[in-house]
Amino acid sequence: MLNEIIDLDKKYYMNTFGNRTPVVFNKGEGIKLYDTEGKVYYDFLAGIAVNALGHSNKDFIDALKAQLEKPLHTSSLYYIENQARLAEKLVSISCADKVFFANSGAEANEGAFKLIKSYFYKKGMTQKTEIITLTNSFHGRTLATVAATGQPKYQKPYKPLLPGFVHVPMNDWSALEKALSEKTAAITLELIQGESGIYPVEKEYIGKIRDLCTKNDIILMVDEVQTGIGRTGKMFAYENFDIEPDVFTLAKALGGGIPIGAVCAKDFLAAAFEPGDHGTTFGGNPFATGAALAVLDIIEKDKLVENAKNTGDYFKAELNKLKEKHTLIKDVRGIGLMIGLEIDESVAKEVFGKLFENGFLASLCGGKTLRFVPALIVTKQDIDLLVKVLDKILNEIKK
C-alpha cells in the first residue's frame, strides 16, 4: 500500500514537498501513530505543533461527532453561535478585546497586516506603510506573508516581493533602531522562531520593543501561530515575556487538527475593521469554531498547559544531561514543549534519520536542529524513551 500511495502522490500531486519521509499513518492513539505496516511511532512533532490533544482524544472526537449532526457551514451572512462563543472565550483568556477567524496561520497573519494598514489609513497617517519583521522568521506562504518572512529561500520564486516589509536580525537593538522611520507602522515577530531552529527572543529585547511601540504609535504584532494554545507552558507565549501585544495571531493547535486561524486584537486596533474591509467564506464556521471550543475546554479540564510547563522543564533538563555526555550536541533551546536540539551539522541529518528508524517523529530545522513539539499530553515516561534512543544513536555515530 505504501508504494501505491507514493506512486499516486508523485503522479498527481504538485511536488511542493519533495521526497517526503516514506511512511503513511492510518491510526493514532495518544502520542502514538501507527503506519500501514503496523509499526508504532512516538509522535514528538504533533503535526508541527497542531495536535495539542494527541491522536484520537475521545472527548474531542465526541465533540466533533456532535457538531457533524448540526450545520457545518452557514456563511458569515448570519450569526454563528460557536463563532461568538469562541471569540468570547479567547478574549476571556487573553489580552485581546476582539477576534476575527480565518482558516490558517498565514490567513490570520494576512488579516493582521490588513488590520494594521487599515488602522493607520483611517487615522490619516498614510505614510505608515512599513512593517518590520525579523530575519530567519516564518510567517506563512501567501505573497504577503512570504514577503514578511525573513528567509530568502522561501522568497526567491516570488520576486519582486510585495513591498512594505523590512527585516532586521533578532535581538539586535541597534539594527532595529536603524530600521525605524516615519513609515514604520508595526513590528511583527515570533517570540520563539520555530522554522529556523527554535530561537527565543531575549526578554529585555521584547520589553524594549513594547515600550518603543507604545511611545511611538507603532503596533506590536506577535505571531503565535506555533507558540500559542499552551505550547510554551503558558496559554500564550507572550505571557512568558511579561508583555501584551496589540494584536496576535493563532492557528495550528487552536483547532486540534481542524483548520482554523484567529486574529486577536485590542479594541483600539480592532475598530479599524469596518463592514466590507475584510471577510472570509469558511473562516469561523460552526464546525471549526466548535472544534476549537472543544480543544480549549479539554486543555483546561485536563490541565494540559500545566503539563506542558512541567514536562517541558523535565524534557530540557534531560536533553541538557545528554548534552554533557555528547559533544555532537551543540545546544538545547526553547520554552515549554517547544524545544530545539542543535546537533553538529555534519551528522544532524543522520541523527534525524535514525530517530525515525527507531520510531520517533521530529523535524529537522535549519539543517541542524531537531524540533520537538509533542502533544501537550506527553509524559515524562515518553520523554525518557526518546532520550534513551537519542543517547543510543549518538553513541553509535560517535564510534
Image: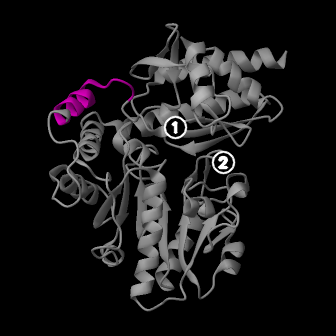
Q: Which mark is residue 196?
A: 2
User: In the current view of this chain or complex, which residue is farthest to the front?
Assistant: 11
Q: How far across and down, in percent of the image, does residue 50 sit?
A: 44, 38
In the image, residue 268 lies in the stretch drawn in magenta: no
Label ID, residue 20: none
**Dot 1 amino acid type:** Ile
Any mark on residue 48, and which?
1
Residue 141: percent from the left, percent from the top?
Answer: 57, 53
Question: Residue at 59% of width from left, 85% of height from top?
Answer: 183
Q: Please state which amino acid type lies under the numbered disc 2.
A: Ser
Tell me if residue 60 is in the magenta stretch: yes
Mark nearer the N terminus (1 vs 2): 1
Observer-nearest residue: 233 or 225? 225
* 57 vs 103, nearest the viewer: 103
Q: Secondary structure at mark 1?
A: helix
Q: Position of residue 75 (x, y in %)?
A: 23, 54
Q: Which residues are magenta?
A: 54-67
Q: Residue 352 sits in which quadrant?
A: top right
**Above or below — where is 213 with respect to 199?**
below
Residue 243 in view of the camera:
no
Q: Quadrant of residue 239?
A: bottom left
Q: Position of residue 134 (x, y in %)?
A: 64, 63
Left or right placement of residue 86 versus residue 218 in this view: left
- Which residue is pictured at 62% across the width and 31% down the height? 319
